[in-house]
Amino acid sequence: MTSNKWITIKGTRDGLTLFMNDQCAWNELLEELGEILSTKHMAVDEPLITVKVELGYRYITNQQEQTLREVIRKHNKLVVDKIASNVILKEEALKWKEETDVNLHNKIIRSGQVLEINGDLLLVGDVNPGGKVVASGNIFVMGNLRGIAHAGAEGNKGAVVAAAHMAPSQLRIAEVISRSPDADSEGAPMECGFIDSKGEQIVMDRISTVARSRPDLNAFERRVMNG
Amino acid sequence: MGEAIVITSGKGGVGKTTTTANLGTSLALLEKKVCLIDTDIGLRNLDVIIGLENRIIYDIVDVLEKRCKISQALIKDKRFDCLYLLPAAQTSDKSALTPEGMVHIIEELKPDYDYILIDCPAGIEQGYRNAVAGADKSIVVTTPEKSSVRDADRIIGLLEQEDMEPPHLIINRIRNHMVKSGDMMDVDEIIQVLSIDLLGIVADDDDVIKASNHGEPVAFQPNTRASIAYRNIARRILGESVPLLSLEEKVTFLDKVKKAFGIKK
């Protein structure tokens, strides 16, 4: 039997973590993984063990990830929880950056006009009744928000909508929609809308309280940390 | 070389045609040479408001389809020598008018006139595009109603995409007593939403309708509130700085006496 050259196994309370060497060949790694797993016999009545794979500075394609999962899954007591790598593709990084960039626009969105943005929107100007702003990230309006704002348009429920003067006809975050009361309301200065902790409806609060409910507003950092 | 100004609103019935007629008259009173163009094919009424209906022989479509020369279609006003009207067609097919045709006509008129005012039809379709095509400047007319302000906002958005100066705003038919009681939007509120420069405000005045029905624009009358408002707007177009007219009703000495004795509230 060969000694473990490339793979280090650590057991934690949450399960196993496999640290993969990132310098050796991929084939050698798979081979060794197969050997290790086949030598560790487990009793039938043992509970399921979750496995976390740390790839270090190795980038693997989707296909490689699939094989890796298959090799581990063959041993029916192991469940792959997460495959983590320190590196990502340039394209992917650029896409993340685009999605989380703050896009500054300096104009008035008038009735019938729609502004669609990938990432966060910072609008220096008003959104008039009948106008609409859509962003995949957060929306910040440094002016009067009187039209429709749709934040997290691609399903991000953590997105927020903030405005210097909040009097929207409709607010949408991910797929949650709320509308203003039918009575003619004056709107409120410096307000922010976000989805409540149950994830059911949009609640409004002063902008100063957002730090408490959304401490990780900077989406780019959040994505880098969580993958 | 003249200046072509399109007068538009998006919504119908806010007073585009009345405004065109009165601004034309006011500019003519200031001795400018003015040509009015009606682009509302099929629903022309600028000719009715300035009382030239029965003089129409050729119209704008005849000019475009080369049935007559542009000078034959132009109607000189019966009151001045410096006001002309190019009427819209009442019967022809709407599609006869094209943006290219409008640009051509306006280019032809520009050397001979100081101002060319284009009366735009309601809506944002073909008729609007025709009217805007040859214009250098634009005036948006709105009334202090939500629907009308909404449409004005839409049209301003469209005008901003055109290659011309930012539009100017005229707020028409303001009823001061309703503004005071909070039932009508006030001027500041409208400007805050539309955020464009205000060219003038015109009070809602029975005289305007009366005058239009007689084919004599109200701007001819010496001192009704509406006529002064229109003439002030004309002076602002010429670059003068004229303060906005107060919307308050004039309280005469006699009224005060009556009020003091409880005869009049």
Image (cartoon, coloured by chain):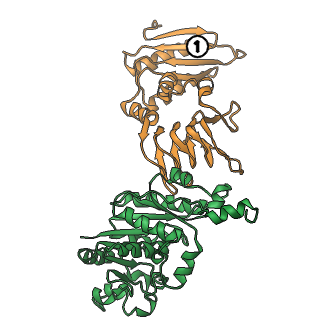
Chain colours: A orange, B green
Residue A208 picture location, percent across and down: 59, 27
Which residue, as the protein is rendered here, is positioned at the far right? B262
Can you identify the residue that label 1 sits on? A16
Q: How many labels does the image show?
A: 1
Q: Nearer the viewer, residue A215 or B243?
A: B243
Taking B54 as reference, is A123 above or below it? Answer: above
> Which residue is at a point 67% across and 58% down the rendered structure image?
B183
> Which residue is at a point 68% across and 13% down the rendered structure image?
A43
Query: What is the secondary structure assignment of the residue under circle 1?
Result: strand
Residue B145 picture location, percent across and down: 60, 61
| Residue A74 visible somewhere in the drawing | no
Q: In this view, does A103 lie to the left or right of B112?
A: right
> What's under tag 1, amino acid-wise?
Leu
Residue B258 placement: quadrant: bottom right
Residue B93 picture location, percent across and down: 43, 86
Q: In this view, does A8 lie to the left or right of A80?
A: left
Taking B100 as reference, is A65 above or below it? Answer: above
Q: Which of B57 and B235 is in front in this view?
A: B235
Residue A142 picture location, percent across and down: 50, 38
| Residue B75 visible somewhere in the drawing | yes
Residue A24 placement: quadrant: top left
Q: Which of B169 and A128 is in front in this view?
A: B169
Taking B234 as reference, is A148 above or below it? Answer: above
Q: Mark 1 lies on which chain?
A: A
Q: Which of B158 and B265 is in front in this view?
A: B265
Instruction: Give the class, few, some or many, for how many residues have Cα within 10 Å of label 1's Cα (few <14, many ≥20).
Output: some
